[in-house]
Image (tube, coloured by chain):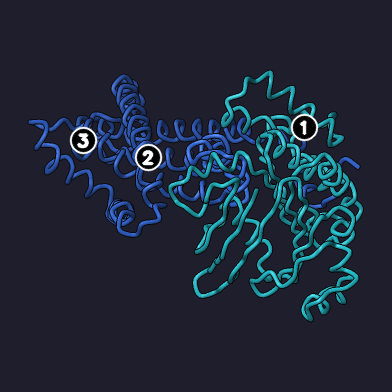
Chain colours: A blue, B cyan
Amino acid sequence: MDFRWEIISEYLPFFMRGLGYTILASLIGFLIGALIGLVIGMGKSLSNPILRLPFIWYVNIFRGTPLLVQIFLIHFAVMPIFIKPPEPLISLIVALALNSAAYIAEIFRAGINSIDKGQREAAYSLGMSHAQVLRHVVLPQAFKRMIPPLGNEFIVLVKDSSLGAVIAAPELFYWGRVAVGAYSRVWEPYLAVAVLYFVVCLVLSYVQSFLERKYATDDQRKKPKKNLRRTRGTAGH
Amino acid sequence: MISVKNLKKTFGELEVLRDINVEIKEKEVVVVIGPSGSGKSTFIRCLNRIEDITDGHVYIEGTDISNKKVNINKVRTDVGMVFQQFNLFPHKTVLENIMLSPMVVRKWKKKDAEEKALALLRKVGLEDKAGVYPESLSGGQKQRVAIARALCMEPKVMLFDEPTSALDPEMVGEVLEVMKQLAQEGMTMIVVTHEMGFAREVGDRVLFMDGGYIVEEAKPDDIFSNPKEERTKAFLSKVL
């Protein structure tokens, strides 16, 4: 089988533009999703079971239905109410934001819940308000633990944004399909697209581990022998 | 200074505090002893409402903190607390641990908070540890930092919830020493502890709790050498 490089080189500008939209849609979707997710995560932690209910069901619904179906519903049913005709890229961003919000909500909630109750009690005993406890004590510690799952979520989102191709959002995979249609060749365009996704995701996973190291508590950076903590009473004496 | 009237606390079906009544005067050191499960930790945690109050009243300098409308955060600035598990903030240095609350709650300037924090670290003998993270401290050092952190808010009363129970035996002394010094300076203190020596030496009054009640209260010498209640006798015969 001959491999026609010229197909790739001819479509590379389109692929790169598509990649730009892929990253743009994923990033905006992720940021909006993080904002909504924060609210939903907090809502799911409310003590009143009735007020909690809508937040729980938001997560259930968006985690329990396929993203592709959500994209179709949003693009063909919901968006036409606001924009005529619906703009595929906007529909894609909205779908990614709403979908990732459900997952990010769980990440926030788990991160916040993972902080020892004693931390909150100590902060309250010092006279801090709920907001101050959250801001100065809980969130800085929780954020560190949220970095790996948030990184995973973003990588998943970058790949899932390829579903935008089916509503003709001009992201990377869309241009792959266009190239396939133009040349009736499948290997070259699809492989090129796969490699580009792979490179982006690889870079992102390095960014993630960099952030993990950056936000590790300073003591862990300076004292790599973390396990010594459990052997009480030896250090400093 | 602190007045507790008919305090009750239940966790679901479980009645932990049944009917607690006690008055604590300024500069008094009150030591709370009793078997585990007697409710002593729950009692002290109700005094700054870290534990919700089921029924009854707790007055801190006349303010009824069982009233939900009371600004509890304000009251807590005057009531310091030291925990069994230290609960230092692991993402902050020793100095930052101590300065945090004075700065965000009391709105002190950084320079003032730092000055005060360093003075307190000197007082608990840990001036050289200002820049390190809690992880590198021993248990005794952590607890002394926790005491300094509570003191930096300039509280009027200090609550100690089993401050030495999580420590290795050789570190109990250094923490008790700091507490003793605090008592001598006239701090009002309520101390839940198993350290009978401390109770005897430093306490003005000992409360013996069992089954959610204060069974007996007396001066340390009286309660240790001449307990009146059978339950007190039984408990003391086991621990002394």
Cα separation between marks 1 and 2: 40 Å
Q: Residues within 10 Å of mark 1 (few under 14, many from 20)?
A: some
Tell me if I can see residue B120 in this picture: yes
User: Disc 2 residue type?
Assistant: Leu
B220 versus A163 height, above or below:
below
The quadrant in which residue A16 appears is: top left
User: In the image, is residue B137 above or below residue B66?
Assistant: above
Q: Position of residue B151 (x, y in %)?
A: 72, 37
Which one is nearer the viewer's eye here, B203 or B73?
A: B203
Q: Say which element carries label 1.
A: loop
Name the residue tied to disc 2: A157
Between the residue at mark 2 and the residue at mark 3, the CA separation in whole angstroms equals: 15 Å
Q: Which residue is mark 1?
A: B132
Instruction: Identify the amino acid type marked 1.
Output: Val
The structure residue drawn at horizontal position 25% and vertical position 30%, both measured from the top left corner, is: A179
Looking at the rendered image, the disc whose residue lies closer to the viewer, 1 or 2, is: 1
Q: Amino acid at mark 3?
A: Ser
Q: Identify the residue under disc 3.
A: A91
Q: Residue A61, percent across and down?
A: 28, 55
